[in-house]
Image (spheres, grey):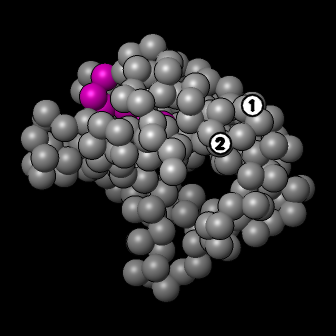
Amino acid sequence: MRTTEIIGLAGTNGSGKDTLGDLRHELQGSRKVSLSDILRTEATRRDQTHERENLRAISTEWGRQMGAGALSLMTLREHWETNGIEYGLSIVSVRRPDEARAIQEQGGTVIWIDAPREVRYQRVQAGARDRIDDQVTYEQFLAQEYIEMYPETDDPFAVNMAGVRDISDIHLVNNFGSKDEYEDFLVKNFKLPELRRK
């Protein structure tokens, strides 16, 4: 598999989206921008916690104000103004179909990454992320995921990860036994330079 210089990384929580963005940065010098981090920064500015419910609300609000693909477009515009078009970009945490389409319309590739639910929950709980939105029971984890996958209304500004999944260009399942195995798969299949482990 080869990807374009611009990729959007979408998928379920704990599936391994950041890992591909991190590898592209480490091995190719590509820039990685997390749309979730942009939302967390805004939540902090508003004196709100980083709970997923707050991040969804900010994302929906911005979508209504600026258009459903606004976060991707803002990220692309800022990247081109800062780095030009010759540098790669990984946009992580694409959560709306219009965000994915904005990437595709600029010649980018959208990659959907998933993994079994129990495995993802264990990864999130074991991660050193110390984020309040990750400190949930398994039942809460599943409920949050359902809300993000399937919006209650046809609101085009709501988070709709199933819609992103359905229009993604590449689909991956990360059911590897270790992060090293997953990284080796990504390096080989995305033709990245060889990874040197310590």
Q: Main secondary structure of the magenta part?
A: strand
Residue 64 visible: no
Residue 58 position, x and y percent, is 48, 63
- Residue at position x 19%, y 51% from top? 78
Amino acid type for the residue under numbered disc 1: Asn
Q: Position of residue 128 (x, y in %)?
A: 65, 67
Residue at image coords 36%, 29%: 193
Quarter in which the N terminus is drawn: top left
Q: Which residues are magenta?
A: 4-9
When asked about the image quadrant of residue 171, the answer is: top right
| The magenta stretch spans residue 7 | yes
Q: Nearer the viewer, residue 123 or 77?
A: 123
Q: Position of residue 130 (x, y in %)?
A: 65, 73
Q: Is residue 83 magenta?
A: no
Label 1–label 2 contact, CB within 8 A = no
Label 2 sits on residue:
179
Instruction: From the viewer's side, name the closer residue of 125 and 11.
Output: 125
When asked about the image quadrant of residue 126, the answer is bottom right
Numbered disc 1: secondary structure: loop
Q: Which mark is residue 175?
A: 1
Question: Left of 160 or right of it: where is 99?
Answer: left
Total numbered labels placed on residues in the image: 2
What's the amino acid at mark 2?
Lys
Binning the other alpha carbons within 10 Å of mark 2 as few (below 14), some (14 to 19) or many (20 upward) gives few
| Disc 2 secondary structure class | helix
The numbered mark at residue 144 is none
